[in-house]
Amino acid sequence: MHVLVLGGTTEASALAAHLAGRRDLSATLSLAGRTSFPKPAPVPTRIGGFGGVKGLGHWLTEHRVEAVVDATHPFAAVISRNAAAACAQRGVPLLALRRPPWQAQAGDRWIDVPTMPDAVAALGPTPRRVFLTVGRLELPAFAAAPQHAYMVRTIEPIGDALPALDVVTIQDRGPFGETDERRLMQEHGIEVVVTKNAGGAATFGKIAAARALGLPVVMVARPPKPDALTVESVDAGLAWIEAHGRAS
Ligand SMILES: NC(=O)c1ccc[n+]([C@@H]2O[C@H](COP(=O)([O-])OP(=O)(O)OC[C@H]3O[C@@H](n4cnc5c(N)ncnc54)[C@H](OP(=O)(O)O)[C@@H]3O)[C@@H](O)[C@H]2O)c1
């Protein structure tokens, strides 16, 4: 059985690691190519877009894919829509592996917003020191709020995404623990954090740190994803693959 894992997440990499070296199936990990030096995976990896629903559909047929696991990031909405459409058209079983969103707890001061422009507006007119952890591609929205000072952390350099603004950049890749996040926020005098509700443990440290420091967090809600059979853990994803292997 050939399994295609749509990746770009910790869970996709973990699933690929479990599928590596198996004799009863082959797995391919697919990455969009957003980061220049992705962590090497122990299974064959293809990098770059497929060319929409049609391109993905051709790829599934050409490579005799018998099961697809959409383990993409909760904010990667287009590829999930494309996967649902292509799998439906080609009759390939699809599983979505989606980590649950973070839930506010006692002590959290979240400002929930539906979109990134709403997050920009939620910062308000008064200048503040903002910790932005929203991903490089979301940064241009914050050019509309030049009154704030930003500390921006991304995996890739931000280039000219926020030109002529008061910006401190940090290039780093998670996981990030609470203690380090707390120290970082204190060192930079951070007053508010902006994040997507990505869920998962690897980047939860900033949420715990903000809670401990009593800082507000502007929390951007997830975009809608297509209906699909969904599990929340790598183990449940593996069980689904095993069941398909037996059935086919
Ligand atoms: N969005 C985030 O906040 C975020 C955070 C961390 C990691 N990621 C990861 O980064 C990647 C891109 O995210 P995005 O938000 O830009 O996605 P997106 O908006 O849903 O997808 C845009 C296009 O990128 C290509 N693509 C996306 N994921 C792909 C994959 N795993 N393999 C091959 N092509 C892929 C597809 O191109 P074609 O139409 O040409 O096939 C898709 O139409 C995803 O793999 C995601 O898991 C995203």
Image (tube, rainbow, N blue to C red):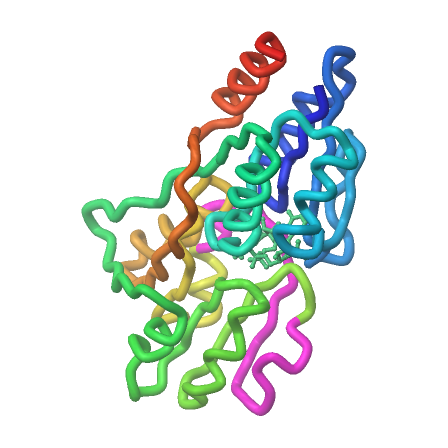
User: Taking 87 as reference, is 104 above or below it?
Assistant: below
Count numbered badges in the picture.
0
Query: Where does the image place residue 54, in percent across and percent down from the top left?
Result: 66, 51
Residue 67's quadrant in the figure?
A: top right
Find out whether residue 56 is within the magenta segment: no
Question: Is residue 1 shown left or right of residue 237?
Answer: right
Image quarter for ligand 1 equals bottom right
The residue shown at (48%, 21%) is: 236
The residue shown at (50%, 50%) is: 81
Query: Where does the image place residue 152, in percent across and percent down from the top left?
Result: 54, 70
The residue shown at (57%, 76%) is: 168
* Residue in front for this viewpoint, 195 or 247: 247
User: Taking 100 as reference, is 229 above or below it?
Assistant: above
Which image quadrant: the N terminus? top right
The extreme left residue here reads: 106
The residue shown at (57%, 82%) is: 162
Which image quadrant: the C terminus? top right
Query: Magenta residues, as a range?
Result: 158-181
* Residue in front for this viewpoint, 156 or 225: 225
Residue 20's quadrant in the figure?
A: top right
Query: Where does the image place residue 156, in percent across and percent down from the top left?
Result: 68, 64
* Residue in front for this viewpoint, 122 or 211: 122
User: Taking 147 as reference, is 73 above or below it?
Assistant: above
The extreme top residue here reads: 246
Query: Where does the image place residue 72, in percent across and percent down from the top left?
Result: 56, 44
Question: Is residue 31 shown left or right of residue 231?
Answer: right
